[in-house]
Image (cartoon, rainbow, N blue to C red):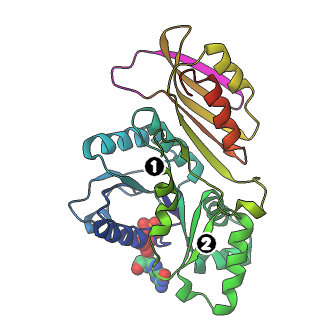
């Protein structure tokens, strides 16, 4: 997921990513979201690259479910190695993450990385004022990232640079920070987590591996765990697991197969409310559970899931 405020340099970065993908034989696809009704940037992108456009609104508020479906369709039709979602500059990142994880229900898709491009010049201005909607949103986008691209440095005085870097590190101690002009960076950095997980047989997601976590505690950082079930679970054990989720998990959803009822259920969890819906899918679905929250232990949760996932060894 590629996020960042309007004009921060997302498209500039995306173009670099696509150039490098070609060099490394990586097959990308793109999902573009624009507030306007016309996709201006899309026309600049190579015709060979599968692209899906969601226009006329911000994915986070108008069509979260559609975002998931769009991703699934891209994945099925083109089988890319990676999908880059460039979201409109005014999007609420957490809401988009929620939409993205929806796709894991229907395709082997995992949210791997959240890259936020920060307009250094604009942020400095907003910091000086210290309040306002834009400032708040920029902070939010910074907070959810695991890679922060501090861009437009050519427009920032050298003496102001450390102030910016310190602010980013303060709001998000877990992300790797790269300082750039015209989003110029080594794109390998954006795949770090992606590559390290590729060898796993049963992929599970961690959008945020805390590479820098050794000197910080795990508080105040967004995490996502996507767990693909290997077998069935007992309904009571599963409900117990949901009820026992730490407060730091504020959203969960997925599809489970219960061994004691011999049917499939779609479950939703939000604000401690649990909802199960019996489903008879017309299409192939995954048995999967996605958890979104802040500062919870991913390994502990995965361990608990493995324990009730009967055929897991
Ligand atoms: N001076 C300067 N200009 C930059 C830099 N990076 C990007 N730009 C310019 O800033 C403008 C916006 O860049 P984009 O990459 O389109 O930004 P975006 O985040 O995709 O913008 P939206 O699609 O509106 O959200 C373009 O004219 C870029 O050429 C930079 O580091 N320094």
Q: Residue at x 43, y 50 (%)?
A: 57
Disc 2, SS: strand
- Residue 228 position (above or below residue 154): above
Inspect the magenta stretch and tell me whether residue 283 lies in it: yes
Q: Residue at x 54, y 42 (%)?
A: 98
Quarter location, residue 302: top right
Residue that extends furthest to the bottom in the rendered view of this protein: 158
Q: Nearer the viewer, residue 249 or 4?
A: 249
Q: Where is residue 16 in the image (x, y as percent from the top left)?
A: 37, 72
Q: Mark 2 points at which residue?
A: 177
Disc 1, SS: loop
Q: Distance between the residues labelled 1 and 2?
A: 26 Å
Few, some or many C-alpha atoms within 10 Å of disc 2 (few <14, some 14-19, many ≥20)? some
Please tell me which of labels 1 and 2 falls first in the chain.
2
Residue that extends furthest to the top in the rendered view of this protein: 261
Few, some or many C-alpha atoms within 10 Å of disc 1 (few <14, some 14-19, many ≥20)? few
Of marks 1 and 2, the one in the foreground: 1
| Residue 89 visible, this orientation | no
Q: In which quarter of the image is the C terminus?
A: top right
Q: Which of 202 and 55 is in front in this view?
A: 202
Q: Where is residue 115 in the image (x, y as percent from the top left)?
A: 53, 62
Quarter location, residue 212: bottom right
Q: Name the residue under label 1.
A: 199
Q: Give the range drawn in magenta.
A: 271-285
Number of the label disc, if any, that sits on residue 41: none
Q: Position of residue 46 (x, y in %)?
A: 24, 65
- Tell me the quadrant of ligand 1: bottom left
């Amino acid at each position: 997921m590629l996020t960042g405020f309007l004009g921060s340099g997302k498209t500039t970065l995306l173009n670099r990513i696509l150039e490098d993908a070609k060099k490394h034989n990586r097959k990308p696809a793109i999902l573009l979201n624009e507030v306007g009704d016309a996709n201006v940037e899309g026309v600049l992108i190579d015709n060979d690259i599968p692209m899906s456009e969601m226009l006329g609104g911000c994915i986070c508020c108008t069509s979260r479910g559609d975002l998931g479906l769009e991703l699934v369709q891209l994945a099925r039709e083109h089988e890319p190695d990676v999908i880059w979602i460039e979201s409109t500059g005014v999007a609420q990142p957490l809401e988009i993450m929620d939409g993205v994880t929806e796709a894991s229900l229907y395709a082997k898709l995992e949210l791997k990385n959240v890259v936020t491009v920060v307009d250094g010049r604009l942020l400095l201005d907003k910091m000086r004022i210290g309040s306002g909607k834009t400032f708040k949103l920029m902070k939010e986008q910074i907070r959810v990232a695991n890679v922060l691209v501090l861009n437009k440095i050519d427009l920032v005085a050298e003496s102001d640079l450390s102030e910016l870097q310190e602010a980013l590190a303060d709001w998000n101690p877990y992300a790797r920070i790269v300082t750039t002009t015209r989003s110029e960076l080594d794109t390998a950095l954006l795949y770090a987590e992606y590559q390290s997980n590729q060898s796993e047989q049963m992929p599970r997601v961690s959008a945020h591996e805390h590479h820098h976590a050794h000197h910080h505690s795990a508080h105040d950082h967004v995490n996502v765990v996507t767990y693909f079930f290997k077998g069935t679970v007992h309904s009571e054990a599963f409900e117990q697991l949901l009820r026992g989720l730490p407060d730091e998990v504020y959203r969960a959803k997925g599809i489970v197969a219960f061994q004691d009822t011999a049917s499939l259920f779609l479950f939703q969890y939000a604000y401690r409310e649990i909802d199960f819906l019996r489903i008879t899918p017309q299409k192939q679905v995954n048995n999967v559970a996605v958890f979104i929250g802040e500062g919870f232990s991913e390994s502990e949760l995965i361990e608990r899931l493995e324990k009730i996932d009967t055929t897991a060894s």
